[in-house]
Image (cartoon, rainbow, N blue to C red):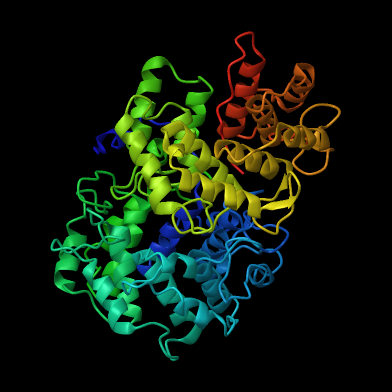
Amino acid sequence: MTYQALLSSSGVVSGESDLWCTYAAVRTLAWLGRTGDLPSPEGVAAYLASRQNADGGFAWSAGMTSDAWATYYCTQAMADLPAGSRAATGRPSSAWVWSTAHADGGFAMTPGQASDVWATYYAVRTLAEIHGERPPPALSDWLAALQAEDGGLAWSPAHAKSGASDVRACYYAVTAWSTATGGAEPLPWDRERLTGWLRRRQSAAGGFTFQAGDATDCLWATFRATSALARLGEAPRDPAGCVAWIRARLGPGGSFTRWPGYPVPDVWAAFCAVGALRELGAGLGDLADGVVATLLSFRTGQAGFTYRAPDVASDVLTTSAHLLAGRLPDGGARDALRWTESCMLPNENGIMYMPGRGSEVRCTLWALSAGAFEDDATARTEIAHWLAGAIQNPDGGFGYWEGRASDMVSTCAAAEILHLTGGDAVPARMRGIAGYAASCETAPGRYANVPGGRDTLRATLQGLRALRRAAAGADSARVRDALDRHRVRGGGYANEGNRVPDLLSTYEAVLAADAFGLGWDPGHLTRFLDSVRTADAGFAWTPLTSAGGGPLADCLGRRLEMRLSPAQDALPPLALS
């Protein structure tokens, strides 16, 4: 894998701030004692506050469903800002966080999902550090069940049974225990086996990997490993070698890159390098000015941050959306595809939303649908192996990324990817997908996004599409029933009920109808598209707003127009929410 295509981005830039980037930038500035260098801390606070929903939780983007990940990042970043600049928020988030608690002692990313260590870490730190509340006593037993046979810690108790230890899981679990108990209660794991497993992840070069068998050290793994060891009162096998390896990632511009051979300094590299050096007790004085200057150059017009200079901060979803909508000239499309194909971590074979962060299932589907790796059978096989091996959860489903609890959106996306890459030839994997889909069935032919949730049109159609790919007897009559229930008389389809149509549900409706060989009314679709078309020839998410929905909405609207055209272009099998 070469990453040179990422140096001067040939992907498409959205210009938007990103929540994870904003949190990482603010937290790094706080560690350096430099939040006072922010030109507009009030603007950052307003950006973060705009992610809060009426339920008290926060979302990755305004208008999306609350989750523990976004709630942690927003509340922590706001707490790091100078006191006079913190924006007023709505109702306290603690009640929403408690709604994600499980009887088993862990926490879920959203209410109703299975508990996992990502979400448990976010929830425990939000409750304890932001609200001063104590997590439930059952947390200790849940954390104890994360230790795998090899001594490391896994994403969930079910993952631990298969031995899926990961440095990140170790950090999240150890930090959740440390935060909940102040480090004063008995450690719920075998200390010697856990510290031994963590220390074995350090290579002779000095950096760390996430898992046994990974070939490339990276800063993210190094930060998480050193942090976990520090909370255990331990140190790496070779602390001096670790410091030297981290400092070797320092570029001429004054900040860090994620791993050897990767050329782009980004916000996560700065966050991980500064965080790891702090844990190791290494000096930061000679680094601070360069890191701060680099971070401040990542600010966007919305006052938040992206992962690198905004004029070259492309992302896979925006780039794929432009490719799928045919908005790039031939030469630009080829360059954009090559850029997209470079968006992989060295130890993962999925595609990232932004270069340098973890591989994500939905982004991989969008990229493949846009033509990535179309002529590279080896890469497509590796993607199938990544899905079928590393990230399929014990319940058979898939989450957004490795270790996240399963949901229907990601599981449907995974089924479509396996079909595109030939990975659906692995019967055991497809049986797992069918089993997870069945667990989300609320009534015959009706599905929720997670077990025990409410059925919706999109979750139902995604479940039926996943079952179809798994050759598990999905019935076209069930699709017709769902479409009839959610058809809006004036045009389009609604995700809940049949009154307010939206673009994403309408796209899923036409896609499912085509997949199951069902007819649909072109006039009905045309009326809907007319109702969401904006003055600049883009598309809104619903007829209730005149504001454009951005590149993803424009892509879905344009693909529906292409489906209505004389060429009747097929809809790509996309999934988003």
134 left or right, relative to 285: right
Where 396 falls versus 421 (above or below)? below
Q: Residue drawn 56% across and 73% down?
A: 106
The spot of residue 268 in percent (x, y) is 36, 55
Q: Dividing the image into 4 quarters, which one contains the C terminus?
A: top right
State how many labels appear.
0
Left or right of residue 470: residue 478: right
Rendering coords of residue 452 (x, y %):
70, 59
Residue in the image at 55% along x and 36% along y: 469
Judge by depth and name the residue closer to the eye, 232 or 314. Answer: 232
**Quarter containing the N terminus:** top left
One can see residue 319 in this view: no
Q: Nearer the viewer, residue 548 or 304?
A: 548
Q: Position of residue 474 (x, y in %)?
A: 66, 38
Q: Residue at x 47, y 37 (%)?
A: 417
Task: Name which quarter of the figure residue 376 lies in.
Answer: top left
User: Looking at the image, is 379 positioned above or below residue 163?
Assistant: above
Q: Nearer the viewer, residue 461 or 205?
A: 461
400 vs 542, left or right, is: left
Residue 148 seen in this snapshot: yes
Residue 4 coordinates in the image, percent (x, y): 25, 35
Q: Seen in the image, is 95 located left or right of residue 217?
A: right
- Residue 105, relative to residue 509: is it above or below? below
* Above/below status of 350 relative to 205: above
Q: Nearer the viewer, residue 294 or 564?
A: 564
